[in-house]
Image (cartoon, rainbow, N blue to C red):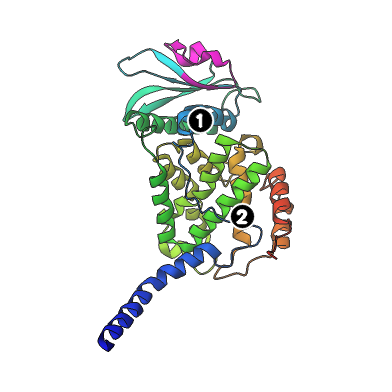
Amino acid sequence: MLYVLAGWFCVSVLAYLLLLPMLRMSRDDREGVERPRGLAEPSTGGVPSPQRLGYSGVILERLAQHTRTVIGVHEAWIAITPPGEQRAHTVVAAAGTDPDVIGMRVARPRAELGGLASAPVMMHGHLRGALCVGAHVNGGGLTRLDMDLLEELAELTGEVLVHHDSRELFRGDSKAEIGALVRAMADADGDTYRHSLEVAATARTVAKRLGLEDLDLVEVELGALLHDLGKLRMPPHILRKPGPLDEDERDLMRLHPEWGCEMVARVPGLEAVALIVRLHHERPDGSGYPHGLTDERIPMASKIVSACDAYGAMTRRRDYSEPLDVDAALVELELNTGGQFDPLVVEVLADFVREPVAVAA
């Protein structure tokens, strides 16, 4: 009997030692390792599925809407060549124009739709359509930056076609792929992972208080969850550097929105979310990166992620700096409204952060 008890004791101790790291990780994920006050509690329901939420069916429409905003034009159209045809195009999505244009067959999209400019939509190296835009809201022609952005949006449109033709867009479920990306962040850097969970929950709360609904909320939450994904490409010694970055390291770090966009766009159903990730460091005064867009050309989802990201970063403890308290962080945000941050987003975030915390009796 003593041998049996001794054996069970040894097994119990061994099991405890093996499970201890996982228990600590679970506890850290729940508690956030000194999770800053004012951030929303990360969701326990897992990542959302764009397919099950019905988001995947309107990706092209969302890209047309974002094109209109980011390029700063009155109208945008996406015309695609159906399989088996070579010259005829069909308008499959549009924004800022008569909805009756959807389904129209055209031979020369830009000319027949009254567009000012267009970019080719390619799939596996073959021309499959065009992304066209109308007149600029400020008048005049498009700049080189405008054309570069149009080409990038056309590339995202091409990703949708790739996923559509491979039947991944509608029949599959990208939840597992999103979860894999989140786990990759957790493995690479626990602080970035926890920060992303907190920012996603807070950004969704702020978006709902701003009146955003349905598809906009999906883009906000997933854009916030994956906003730092591009940091996976950073050299570990820079990502985990216990101190401020030097100038060259900062230049490299500034590439993470573009890298993140590329990675997110490969997930079926997240092509428009990839744009939100790409633009989350743009600033209303035009001093942001990677494009230097001004206020009216930055999607609201990216503005929300930007402010929530900054608040989360300022109130999180780092190896080389103490966190700011809630009031100091909000003062910093408010001092930079209109320049770095959207004033309305900061106002709503501040109202949420300053709400009294309910204490259980």
Indicate the amino acid at tag 1.
Answer: Leu
Residue 67 image point, x, y percent: 54, 29
Is residue 94 found inside the magenta-colored segment of the image?
A: yes
Q: Is residue 285 visible?
A: no
266 versus 86 height, above or below: below
**Mark number, residue 40:** 2
**Mark number, residue 63:** 1
Is residue 122 found inside the magenta-colored segment of the image?
A: no
Q: Is residue 301 visible?
A: yes
State which mark lies toward you, 1 or 2. 2
Which corner quadrant holds the C terminus? Answer: bottom right
CB contact under 8 Å: marks 1 and 2: no
Taking depth in this image into account, of 274 and 48 the one nearest to the observer is 48
At 59% across and 59% down in the image, what residue appears? 313
Residue 33 image point, x, y percent: 55, 67
339 versus 232 height, above or below: above
In the structure shown, which secondary structural element does the residue marked by tag 2 occupy?
loop
Instruction: Please rate how many residues cluster around mark 2, counting C-alpha atoms within 10 Å: few if below 14, some from 14 to 19, many from 20.
Output: many
**Mark number, residue 175:** none
Residue 30 image point, x, y percent: 52, 63
Query: Which of marks 2 and 1 precedes in the sequence?
Result: 2
Taking depth in this image into account, of 38 and 228 the one nearest to the observer is 38
Indicate the amino acid at tag 2.
Answer: Ala
51 versus 230 height, above or below: above
At 36% across and 37% down in the image, what residue appears? 172
Left or right: residue 328 versus residue 50 is right
Taking depth in this image into account, of 64 and 168 the one nearest to the observer is 168
Bounds of the magenta span? 92-113
